[in-house]
Image: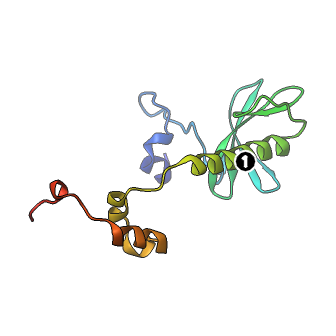
């Protein structure tokens, strides 16, 4: 067992004894089956039909794509793609839209939440909100 394997037990097969082996190889592992396509790395996980691949953009995993006999698909839509790149881009684009829509519906942080942020990370608008904020007496605690 290598040093990196021993230090990351989450990557080990939960079997007993000395027969432990990696079940989720990172894209940098020399034993990993990696398919490199422009801007993405696909790392084979398992399966015969479909074959399952984890999709990495830079060093972050963004999701999973599947290689069927006649097409590719991803884990977020019901579209059949002709190429692995198209399935990976479709996955990436879906996630970008999901992040934007989730951010658009999120409420701004409360003043209490702003007080928990590092001062250097506050925006001018957040500083202005905090200047106007008057905590309720019931919220004050003697130190």
The image quarter containing residue 64 is top right
- In percent of width and height, residue 54 lies at 67, 41
- What is the tally of numbered marks visible in this picture? 1
Residue at the spot of label 1: 92
Foreground pick, 98 / 106:
106
Q: Is residue 17 rendered to the left or right of residue 55? A: left
Q: Quadrant of the C terminus?
A: bottom left
Residue drawn at (36%, 58%) of the image: 113
Q: Is residue 97 rendered to the left or right of residue 69? A: left
Residue drawn at (82%, 27%) of the image: 68
The image quarter containing residue 76 is top right
Q: Residue furthest top?
A: 49
Way the structure is coloured: rainbow
The crowding category of the residue bearing disc 1, from other C-alpha atoms within 10 Å (few below 14, some 14 to 19, many at least 20), is: many
Q: Residue furthest left?
A: 142
- In percent of width and height, residue 139 lies at 19, 55
Q: Is residue 24 rendered to the left or right of residue 19? A: right
Residue drawn at (37%, 63%) of the image: 114
- In percent of width and height, residue 58 lies at 68, 58
Identify the element where label 1 is drawn: helix
Foreground pick, 82 / 41:
82
The image quarter containing residue 115 is bottom left
- In percent of width and height, residue 127 lies at 41, 73
Residue drawn at (83%, 46%) of the image: 85
Foreground pick, 132 / 52:
132
């Amino acid at each position: 067992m290598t040093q990196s394997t021993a230090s990351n037990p989450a990557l080990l097969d939960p079997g007993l004894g000395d027969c432990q082996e990696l079940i989720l190889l990172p894209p940098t592992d020399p034993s990993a089956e990696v398919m490199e396509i422009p801007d993405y790395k696909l790392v084979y996980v398992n399966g015969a039909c479909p074959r399952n691949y984890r999709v990495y953009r830079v060093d972050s995993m963004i999701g999973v794509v599947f290689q069927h006999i006649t097409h590719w698909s991803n884990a977020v839509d019901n579209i059949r793609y002709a190429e692995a790149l198209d399935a990976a881009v479709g996955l990436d684009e879906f996630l970008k839209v999901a992040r934007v829509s989730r951010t658009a519906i999120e409420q701004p942080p409360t003043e209490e939440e702003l007080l928990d942020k590092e001062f250097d990370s506050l925006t001018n608008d957040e500083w202005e909100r905090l200047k106007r904020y008057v905590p309720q007496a019931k919220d004050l605690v003697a130190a």
